[in-house]
Amino acid sequence: MELKEAIARWKELNVDRVVLTFNCGGDSMGDMNWEVFGANNQRIEDKDLISYFDREVFNCVDFYVNSDGHYIGESGTVTIELEDYEDDDIEGDFAYNKEAYSDYSESHVSTVLIELEDKEVVYIKEYVRDINGGYDESVNFNYSKDFIMTDEMIELEASIAEKIGDFTSQYMPDDIEEDGHLEDWYSFNTDDFDPIEFEGNSIKVTINNSVTVQRYSEEW
């Protein structure tokens, strides 16, 4: 089907608009759902028109499928309407209007305090240079000097790891953007503080959460 045939078919069916609902990203197009509407939002079934627009839309609309770690993808609609002309010598044409939102993965950094016991604080101050970890990782201790670890130290470190691991894995920032969505991935460390800082018996930890933020798409 060519343009002139598509216009003729549009008029024959009294189509008001055709709407594509789409999502894309991850270097490919995702779902594409076509709907044809007549007067009073009545749905019309016509495979020929949908087949035409399913091909032609890529010549008339830019879809940004290439993700880069920051940009994830976009989703929205393309509304197609007929621009007809009163002059019989001028062919009509279709207007494509894309409205979409783009998803971005952004970092949200928080500094938190995690309460420990006296002996745990003493152990960290004496032997630990920094602590780090994250999603799907164990809590990692880097030491400030060589020493022989006793059974009591092993228990202390396990207790510290459990407290820090539980807190950071369950942490939900309360100041992310209203339309932000907290992802599973996060990391944490005490590296920003050298030496490790405490407030009373609470250790300072930096948590870096990944947050998906949705913004209205602009033409690139």
Image (cartoon, helix red, strand yellow):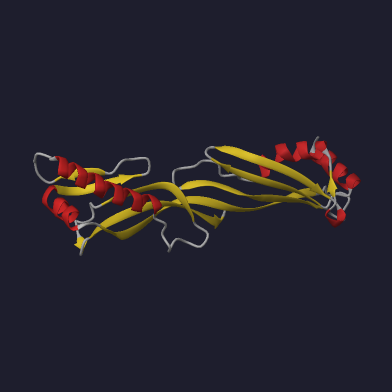
Q: How many marks?
A: 0
The one of 23 and 207 positioned closer to us in this rendering: 207
**Is residue 220 shown to the viewer in this render?**
no
Question: For residue 215, what is the image quadrant?
Answer: bottom right
Horizontally, residue 88 falls left or right of residue 57, namely right
Give the side of residue 114 with respect to residue 126, left or right: right
Write down the quadrant of residue 48 in the picture.
top right
Q: Is residue 202 visible?
A: yes
Q: Is residue 168 left or right of residue 38?
A: left
x and y percent of residue 10 in the render? 85, 45
Classify 39 as above or below 35: below
In the rendering, at what x and y percent does residue 73 appear? 54, 46
76, 139: nearer the viewer: 139
Q: Residue shown at 16%/54% (left/top)?
A: 119
In terms of depth relative to the viewer, which is nearer, 191 or 79?
191
Determine the residue positioned at 12% across, 48% down: 127
Q: In the rendering, at what x and y percent does residue 132 appear?
A: 27, 46
- 53 displayed left or right of 124: right
- Which quadrant of the rendered structure holds the N terminus? top right
